[in-house]
Image (cartoon, rainbow, N blue to C red):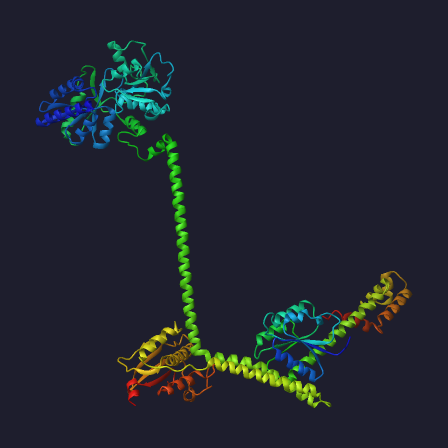
Amino acid sequence: MLRSLGALFAVLVWGASALAETGAVRVGVLAYQGSERAARDWEPTLAHLERSIPDHRFVMVPLDLPGMVLAVEDRRVDFVITNPGNYVTLEARFAVTRIATLESDAAGSPAAAVGSTVVRRADRTDIAGLADLKGKRLAVVSTDAFGGFQIAWREMEEAGLRPFTDLRELKVVGFPMEGVVAAVRDGSADAGVLRACLLEELAAQGWVVPGEVAVLGEHPASDLPCRVSSRLYPDWPFARLAHTPRDLARQVAAALLTMPTVEGKAWTASLDYTTVHELFRTLHIGPYPRTPPALEELAHRNWHWLAVVGAAVLWWIIHAARVEVLVRRRTAELEREIAERERAEAVALRLREERDQLSRLGIVGEMASNIAHELNQPLAAISNFAHGMTRILDAPAPNMGLLRSGARSVAEQAERAAAIIQRTRGFVRRRNAQRSTIDINAVVTETLSLFGAPAVPIQVQLGDALPAVKADKVELQQVLLNLLQNAVEATLEVAPEIGGGDITVRTARFAGMVMLEVRDAGPGLPAEAVAKMFEPFYTTKLDGLGLGLSICRTIMERHGGRIWAEAKPDRGLTVRFVLPAAAEEEAS
Amino acid sequence: MTDAPLVLMVDDDEGMRASVGYLLASVGIACETFASAEAFLASPWLRPPLRPGCILMDVRMPSMSGIELLRHLKERGCKRPVVMVTGHGDVPLAVTALKAGAEDFIEKPYKDQTLLDAVNAAIRKCRLVLARSAGRDAVQARLAQLSRREREVLTLVLDGKQNKEIAAALNISIKTVEGHRQMAMEKMRARSVAELARMMLAPEDEG
């Protein structure tokens, strides 16, 4: 924490000074081992640049990893010198472009100059390879360190070891990197990660006794004259930022490439950093954060938790699904029930309407048919008895006993017939008419709704401000229903292609009375039929009784009104009735 | 067993049963009445020995209808002709009745003579059926008396074969054929081959 504060302080100081010196070219350098070390490492390069490009001053801005990102983001630097790992991150996020790659004397080739060395104490022979680090303690300088950790991380992953979960401890010792060796040496860590060649440097300094440490997972054929535990990556790049002037960048690049080797460091043409990208992609770090592909790995790593979570989720899904299914089923049941009830009500309503209609229109016919049927039996029986008796009487010696029983039977059957008629009369006894002052238009509206959905469209033309009539509403409805039924039947007789046309119901004033007319476009009637149509038992229908209009006339006459019909010569029939206005009737 | 005809009447209406019974009695025809198809089927009259007569039934009855009863009777192989009484103008029902095997149908309301004519015709038909049935039984009985050889000879005679041909076919002498033939004709009480053929064919064309 203190260290990072220090680093931040350094950033601020250097940043401020860089800003203060206008016209200065600021070069951010990754000072992973502190500002002084960075200054020592890169001072020759900057001095060379200043010499080569005299009209610019080059100011070094030492930065730690987070500071580097911030500085690039805020454009507080024009160039950066950083490790390959940090570079690819900056490249991906801020379009930083490398213009040269470090060529170090220590490394055989700048393309294979950076790697990691994993070391253990020589006496820890129980750790033979990277995979054996499972459950062990590993010292690293920082988990953000490229050579100091990330490169080794990849090798460990490939060896089947996941450093963040499989190790007993990932011990971060911080810079300088010698601390890692110290931790390994004093046994506080079982192994440690060093950047490649540090081991050799330390050995040269005498800090490490030869044979004191062993290298784990050593890559044998290395381009580097050092022992490494990893594949190798290109050396540090010198990169320009997106905002850096192109000319300046070109000048700097040229200068770098012409820089002679100073203290074992020179610059060469920028190399391919694909291998670094690969590394980061594998580890899902830097520019390749853990996004979808990480899931699989995460699942692998946390399978037991995932199993629990999965089970929980599964249970929840099942529960939710079950609840959903139940809710749906219940809802469907409820809806079905409601629909059922509505349908039942609709059916009941329709039946009621039909019954009303039947009782208004067809009761006479129905009753007549029933009476006829019921009377048939006793009449046929009487006929049989009578004929039988005749035959007996015709015989040479009539059997008197048989004749008597026949006569008795005839009487019985006659009584039975009388009982049927009696019963029927009781059934059809007319209700008492109830007269009230009513609006004929209201009767029309109500009757049409009783009539239900007719087979033929019905046009309604109701007259304005009609006087009320004094009438029995049910009887008026009966008349109107009768007329409507006749009109519908007449219209349906006409072939549809000719077009029966609509039925029109109209109300109007008529010579001080209230008139209602029902007009159809049916075949019409011949004049003699029109003259007789209100007489009882006159019918043109195949199964008609000829009573409907006769009853209508009776009703109209009882109300002091009149009913008549007019047929057009070609087709169509109009039936009208008039009723006296209520006030008029009261006055008379 | 009496030969006097008997009408079996099924009608749910009591007045009709009584009056039809009375009418039939007035012309000397005995009548048994039943209020329902079920009662009728349970009665002993359907079992042999059969008295000549007919069945008179109303098409429309509660529970089992006349048509159903008719089908039942036909399934049971009832030989008595059935006269159905239908409502006025009920042509489809009358057709159905005839298809189901009714002898005749009369429409209500009917004149007494119509009913009596139909009943008498049906009774005559019944006698005929019974007579044919009896004749068939007699022929069967006579056939049963024939020996195997006599039967073989008769079969070939009916095929129109001469005695000579029969003798060759059965590998016997003509004399023997003549003997078997004469014996068989006597047993069958047939005076000629034509009569024998009629006798043998009669059972076949009776349904």
Q: Position of residue A168 (x, y in %)?
A: 34, 22
Extreme residue in the right direction: B175
- Can residue B19 be seen? yes
Tell me: A196 left or right of B8.
left
Is A82 on the left-hand or right-hand side of A534? left
Residue sitting nearer the eye, B196 or A391:
A391
Splitting the image into 4 quarters, where does residue A478 fall? bottom left
Looking at the rendered image, the quarter that the N terminus of chain A falls into is top left
Q: Tell me residue A280's x, y (percent).
A: 29, 28
Please tell me whether residue A453 is drawn above or below residue A80 in the rendered image: below
Q: Is residue A542 visible to us here?
A: no
Q: Position of residue B34 (x, y in %)?
A: 65, 74
The image quarter containing residue A377 is: bottom right
| Relative to B152, A584 lies left or right | left
Q: How many marks?
A: 0
Q: Position of residue A79 (x, y in %)?
A: 16, 26
Quarter of the image where the C terminus of chain A is located: bottom left
**Which image quadrant for residue B80?**
bottom right
Residue A317 or A71: which is nearer the viewer? A317
